[in-house]
Each structure stands twice: as structure tokens, then as C-alpha cells.
Amino acid sequence: MTLLELSEQYDYSSQLLRQRIAILQKMARETDDEESRHRLCRRVRDLQPLLRQCRQLRDLTAHYYERSFHRNENYTL
């Protein structure tokens, strides 16, 4: 698997995460139960770092070999 193919996989994963977050946020807005709303919001907060990491890794793998690309300092050795 090439880095470009890996980038596409990260992009797909970020789309799925974004969709799931949107569903959970909608469910939280529509529920009347405070405990359920709290659990849904907690799940959204747990998924947001995963979404951010998928996006960062997507960009890193897509542009890794470009000379002008400034790599994310979180993912350097």
C-alpha cells in the first residue's frame, strides 16, 4: 500500500467519523433524557480527537514526499 492509498483510507475514515459525530449530535439535541444527552455528548467528545488525527494523518500521508509540505510535528521522529 502506498502513502497515497493510505491517505485515501484516512480520508474515508474521517468521513465516517464526521457522519457518526453528526448523528450523535442530532440525537443529543432531540433527546429529552438528560443522562442520555450527557452520554451522547461524551461520545462526541471522545470521537473528535480521532477525527482530528485522521485528518492530520490524511494530510501527512498525501503530501509526505512534497518538498514544500510542512509536516505535522506530532508525527515526526
Image (cartoon, rainbow, N blue to C red):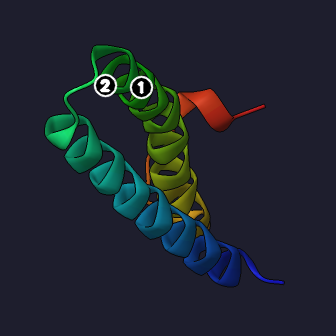
Quadrant occupied by the N terminus: bottom right
Q: Tell me which residue sits at (42%, 57%) in the image.
A: 20
Residue bearing the label numbered 1? 45
Identified by mark 2, the residue type is Arg
Residue bearing the label numbered 2? 37
Q: State the residue lying farthest toward the right.
A: 1
- 23 versus 33 height, above or below: below
Q: Tell me which residue sits at (22%, 36%) in the image.
A: 31
Along the line of sight, the residue nearer the viewer: 36 or 76: 36
The residue carrying pointer 1 sits among few (fewer than 14), some (14 to 19) or many (20 or more) residues within 10 Å by Cα, namely few
Identified by mark 1, the residue type is Arg
Q: Residue 2: where, in percent of width, then height?
A: 77, 82
Q: Residue 28: where, in percent of width, then height?
A: 25, 36
**SS for dot 2:** helix
Q: Is residue 71 visible?
A: no
Quadrant occupied by the C terminus: top right
Q: Quadrant of residue 48?
A: top left
Q: Residue 59: where, in percent of width, then height?
A: 47, 60
Q: Nearer the N terminus, badge 1 or badge 2?
A: 2
Q: Tell me which residue sits at (36%, 17%) in the image.
A: 38
Q: Residue 22: where, in percent of width, then height?
A: 28, 53
**SS for dot 1:** helix
